[in-house]
Amino acid sequence: MGSKYFDLVIAAFMAYFAYTRFVEGQTGFAVLFVVLFILNILTFTVKLRKEKQQDESNLR
């Protein structure tokens, strides 16, 4: 359960780093942080769906 929220915190940091890199003109690093942000959000959604499926299977 805690790792899901950790993914959100890391994603927030990645979004912040991407924004600051864009502002400072370091586009290459900004794109890297945007990709990492997207991967973290994707990981969060996969974990959320997996947990939801486990909860539904436990109710049956």
Image (cartoon, rainbow, N blue to C red):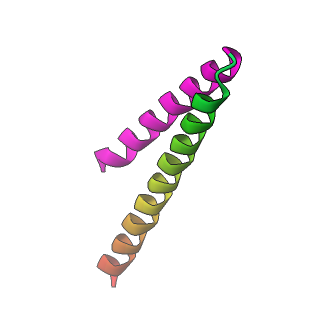
Image quadrant occupied by the C terminus: bottom left
Between 1 and 15, the one lying in front of the other is 15
Q: Is residue 9 magenta?
A: yes
Look at the picture and state if 55 lies above or below 39. below
Look at the picture and state if 27 lies above or below 36. above
At horizontal 40% and vertical 74% (from top left) the residue drawn is 53
At horizontal 46% and vertical 52% (from top left) the residue drawn is 44
Image coordinates of residue 21 in percent, x first then y, are 61, 21
Image coordinates of residue 39 in percent, x first then y, are 51, 50
At horizontal 34% and vertical 80% (from top left) the residue drawn is 57
Q: Is residue 16 magenta?
A: yes
Between 32 and 11, the one lying in front of the other is 32
Between 16 and 57, the one lying in front of the other is 16
Look at the picture and state if 25 lies above or below 42. above
Q: Please provide the residue range marked out in magenta.
A: 1-24
Look at the picture and state if 24 lies above or below 42. above
Left or right: 57 in relation to 23: left
Question: Of all residues shown, which one is farthest toward the bottom?
Answer: 60
**SS assignment for the magenta stretch, majority:** helix
Left or right: 58 in relation to 37: left
